[in-house]
Image (spheres, helix red, strand yellow):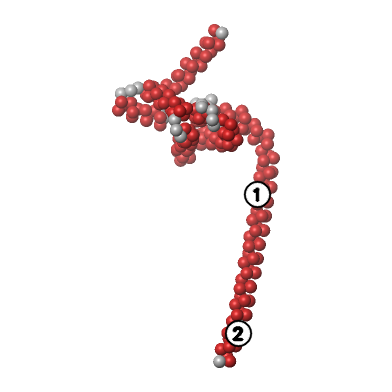
Amino acid sequence: MSGVRSGERSAMASLRERFNNYVNGDNFVSRMLGKVEEKTGIKKNYLATGSLCSLGLYLVFGYGASLVCNLIGFVYPAYTSVKAIESADKKDDTIWLTYWVVYGVFSVVEFFSDIFLFWFPFYYLGKCAFLLWCMAPFSWNGSQILYSRFILPFFLKHHRTVDSVVSDLSGQALNTAENVTRHVLQTLASSRTLLVRDGGQQALPSTSQSKEQ
């Protein structure tokens, strides 16, 4: 028991140290907290802890928790992804591409599980914590772990089959598009021929009548 407790204490101490390093580091969140600290005089650590607690309570009891949770999982990663695309360093591109792959897989899984879990009072709190873990600025964040342990092995095992299916579907889609286009063009040509024929037949009586007059 003492060994387990000491392990839990060391893990908590490590998390606390990482949290403090991130809050006091050079990043977007730290700069925003710094501005609030200058105006209020409250330290960054307290501001960050209070903000997280308030966010957690809102996700459990607040209205529109789903929207807030989705904004957290999309807006900041999208903003940072644009910065990563425009930067010369390609390492951050890989980091955020990994996040979006995991986010896409999670969205598909959530589509089916949301029917059974949305009523759970801590569902959005857990979802928000999961998304924050996936975008956390350290090497063992959720995106890296889930991608390397589950998504990548699955991809390496089945990517040939998936490529074959995608290729077949693409070929079928092209053939269908060609057939539909050919049918539409033939229909338009037939309609034009009929219109010209009907117009000529209607014009003949009028011409003969004018001559008789």
Q: Which residue is painted at 65% across and 58% down in the image?
A: 180
Dividing the picture into quadrants, the one containing residue 32 is: top left
Tag 1, which secondary structure? helix
Which quadrant is home to the N terminus? top right
Kindly give the residue lying farthest to the front in the view shown: 119
Question: What x and y, as percent, mark residue 125?
Answer: 49, 27
Q: Who comes first in sequence, dot 2 or dot 1?
A: 1
Discs 2/1, front = 2
- Amino acid on which disc 2 is placed: Pro
Please name whichever residue, 72 or 120, is drawn nearer the observer in this view of the structure: 120
Q: Which residue is mark 2?
A: 205
Tag 2, which secondary structure? helix
Question: What x and y, as percent, mark residue 50?
Answer: 39, 23
Please name whichever residue, 89 or 70, is drawn nearer the observer in this view of the structure: 70
Q: Is residue 204 visible?
A: yes
Dividing the picture into quadrants, the one containing residue 183 is: bottom right
Please name whichever residue, 135 or 205, is drawn nearer the observer in this view of the structure: 205
Q: Which residue is painted at 46% across and 34% down in the image?
A: 64
Q: Which residue is mark 1?
A: 170
Left or right for 136, reference 176: left
- Amino acid on which disc 1 is placed: Ser
Left or right for 157, reference 60: right
